Amino acid sequence: MTAAALTQVRLRSARYWLPFAAVSVTALCAMGLLFRAEAAAAVQVWLRSTAYGHCFLVLPIALWLAWDRRQGARGLAPVPTAWPALAMLPFAAAWFAAERLGLMEGRQLAAIGMTEAVLIALLGWRLARVFAAALLYLVFLVPFGSFLVPALQSVTAWFVDVGLGVLGVPHVVDAFVIEVPDATFFVAEACAGLRFLIAAVAFGALYGLVVYRGPWKRLAFLAASCVVPIVANGLRALGIVLAGYLIGDAEAAAADHLIYGWGFFSAVIVLLTLAGLPFRDDFRASVAPVRATGARLPSPRLAATAALATVLTAAVAPAIAGLLNRDGPAPNLDLPGFAATADCVAAPPHGGMARFDCHGLTLTATVQALPARASPAALRAARSWATGEQDAADAVTSVLTVDGVRPAEWRLVELRDPERLAASAAWIDGDPAMGGFAGRARQAWNSVAGGGKPPVLLTVALASPRQLLPAQEREQAIRLLGDFLRAQAPMFAAIRRATGGR
């Protein structure tokens, strides 16, 4: 190629890259605007939860992975294509389903998938394949995995139970409560090992992408990164319980166990890394550079077309959800007032809530009717506000059984800072629901198809249960809540009729 021809290629390349960069930045900004709620919710979780603090490193790591693979892109120019717009349709459908069901993690995963489809449409298939590792690693921007906490608590309790049995230590295990002579332990959410598991999976994915070339080795190391932290956390919990048994003091054994846990976890990661090194591959394969030619580069209009097609496809689901969320004002239901009990005397209402004085403790009760087409996310937000979960530093959920009334099972949440004990239930199409998937699915269908009755949420909360005697505080608070709920049978019957039940 002559010097003049090479100069012309470089000039065409310069004229191409500036419009391409402008189109790419505009498309990514548009995606950020469309899914700003998902991005904001993710950042809030990163800031609030230590289990997801590593998410701040995901984007820099993805950029480093792209830079590390730059040699594979030598001689390749972006070849935009609009075909990824079709691949976005399943992601858009998944986002809409997650939005209707009130699953923020599902919305965030679908948004990441659609954003990656936009990048693939702009880069073209060949460049996207070169930078596939960087694109796939972006999935760790989503703070997913919190639904695993109950299962991890059960596994940890089971591990301690089996370990104590093997060691011959007398013990009793009741759900997440473990009792040994002179010490009692509770497998709390913070001790379930989620933070260790999430960080280990993110590390395992990065390690596999950097150290191994074959997909099977990468998958094997990723699987080990899932299993090893769970086993290690079980051993850590067993060690804490065993120490409490030996010294006869649960609090002393568990002191600073989270700090020690991170040290233990770091040691486990080091051992896992060393175990994987003997199977490493030489990742840097030789890449033959592609010489520049006088071939015509794709027009920037093609990049604009690809960006427009993918962004518009991504915008369809949020647009439909926005129309459905315009559900009008909440209905006014004719319901009886809350009834007092022998232990809870009516007090002046405050802020639209009924208030009762229960031997010096304050009990508040609220009933709220939502629009018939309200999404499960709106119902969940109303529940979080009514119970106080949105402002609490820690929350533990369980089931409160109240005999003699319907519903007999209530969602019980114990909050710390501020101290609060709250029971709640929602009526959907006449049936009570605590907030499980079945109730979400039913309300999600009502929000789309219409024709359903307005959902109703009832919450009863007892503030500062720790003011009771230390040995009886929880039992006494639960008894007060149960007695109060039993006295509200007429209101429950009225709510059931108002929401379509019999």
Image (tube, rainbow, N blue to C red):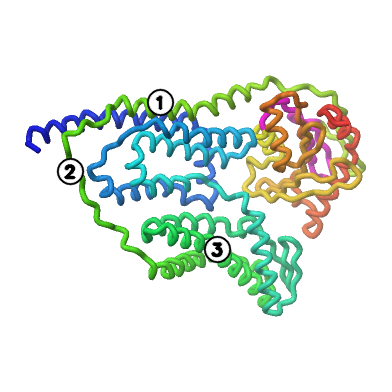
Relative height, residue 246 to residue 307 (above, below): below
- Labels 1, 2: front one: 2
Residue tagged 3: 227
Say few, some or many: other residues with alpha carbon within 10 Å of mark 3 (under 14 / 14 to 19 / 20 or more): some
Residue tagged 1: 308
The answer to which of 40 and 104 lies nearer the viewer is: 104
The answer to which of 68 and 265 lies nearer the viewer is: 68
Q: Where is residue 66? Give x, y as percent.
A: 33, 47
Q: Which residues are magenta?
A: 349-375
Q: Where is residue 262? Give x, y as percent.
A: 51, 62
Residue lying furthest left? 3
Q: Secondary structure at mark 1?
A: helix
Instruction: State the image quarter where residue 167 is shown.
Output: bottom right
- 260 vs 357, left or right, is left
Relative height, residue 159 to residue 13 (above, below): below
Instruction: Residue 362: say if magenta.
Output: yes
Residue at image position (89%, 42%) is 405
